[in-house]
Image: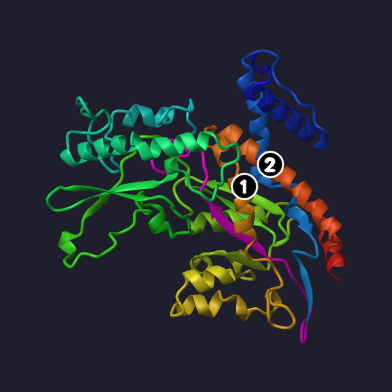
Amino acid sequence: FSPRLRGDHVWSAFVILALIRDARAHRRLLRVPHTGEQRVRFNAAMHDRNLRIIALGQREIQHHCKGCMRIYEEKEEGTESCQPVVSDGLTIGHPCCKTFRCTKSLDKIRNHWCPGCAKLCADQCAVENCVRKIVPTDNTKMTCDDETHVEMERKTVQRGQSMFVLTSRLTRSRISAPDFDAETDDDALVWYEVDALNRVTQRVDSHPVNVGVSDADADRPDRQIKPASAPALCPSKTPKRQRILLARRRTACEVTLIRPCGIILQRATMFGAEAVSNVLKMTKTSFSVPGARKPEMFIYDTACEAKQQAMNLDDDWWDDVHMVVDPWHLVTKHKTTHDFCQKYCNPASYPELMREDGKGWWFNTSVAEQTNVWLGSYHSILKEMLPIKYNFFLDEMIRLKNIDTIQTLKDRRLMPMYYPSDTEALESVLT
């Protein structure tokens, strides 16, 4: 006996119900073809909705409540309000083109290159930054004739076949809801160090982290590779660090914008790295849609880098937005000797973020990390999706999550509401 209900049936039901709800909410007709394969039949409708959410964000972009907005009195300026937004990156993603930062979609889930890059790079060595042609041997299939590159491929394949990796995969396959915090071995960061004698040493980081980086670092494919634990005495003897990509490349991370009350406003996929400049661009775009209200505070784990970039931009949009590092990251990840960070991005400099007694914080500044734990629980579902389904699934789950959060806020009597689109009505709410 085998059950008749299959995974593709569940997926079709999920998509159809979500599209019908979306069409009804926007008073539109849902039009899909009556012919063709079921697996691609709704792609055009899903893609249209994805584009609309990119342009306009979630409905809750206009949200405010007592849990995320504070009204306080200033001695000289009278009544003021503060409604922060918290941003953070999460290391989940979908398969993408192997060309670093290429945003074109793959034709098929098992492909390594988009159609355009495949014509140029399909026979290129798998070691990053090597443009030599593949020279197959009895033991290697994806590297050139450089001996160190051949050794990298051999060690990578050997590690993938090791008993430890196979055992961990078997264990995960038996768990219906794996703990996302326990990073899977498939997502470990592997790189190689090549010394002056061309000896190849494999290094593994089982728990790679994702943080906002400058544009200069974001342009480096090897930005995540860590230096040797003990620095070399002579710079000329420092091992050369390299990566090899035998499997598909994945997008770097998802960046989210979240209110302190837990409402998720927007998310965006970062292909190469969590470049701070892209986070700034995403934030400005998200709060430039009709009805959105610019945040007074932007809370981000690398706010000091974001603040420096914003000050150098020829854009006055950020002039009245304060940028602060959340307290946990400031204490554990930022140096006390970093004068710029302490001067501009220390949350203790802003009384509106603190309780009246000065012994705690008014807002939950760790809400992004907490929400990302929930979002990361879908990692195993998302990792084999192409962009259309990936984005549609994430946006729909966020929409449903926001509905639950709104109900929780109502139960706690925090009065969740939406900003009106016109300025006069908005001023009446604040006064």
Q: Which residues are magenta?
A: 74-103
Is residue 82 part of the magenta span, yes or no?
Answer: yes
- The quarter holding residue 351 reads bottom right
Disc 2 marks which amino acid? Answer: Met
The image shows residue 216 at horizontal and vertical percentages of: 38, 58
User: From the image, which quarter does the N terminus lie in?
Assistant: top right
The image shows residue 245 at horizontal and vertical percentages of: 34, 38
The residue under label 2 is 397
Report if residue 98 is visible in the image: no
The residue under label 1 is 375
Front-most of 410 and 267?
Answer: 410
| Label 2 element class | helix
- Residue at figure coordinates x 66%, y 27% from the top left: 11
Is residue 179 part of the magenta span, yes or no?
Answer: no
User: From the image, which quarter does the C terminus lie in?
Assistant: bottom right
Front-most of 213 and 373?
Answer: 373
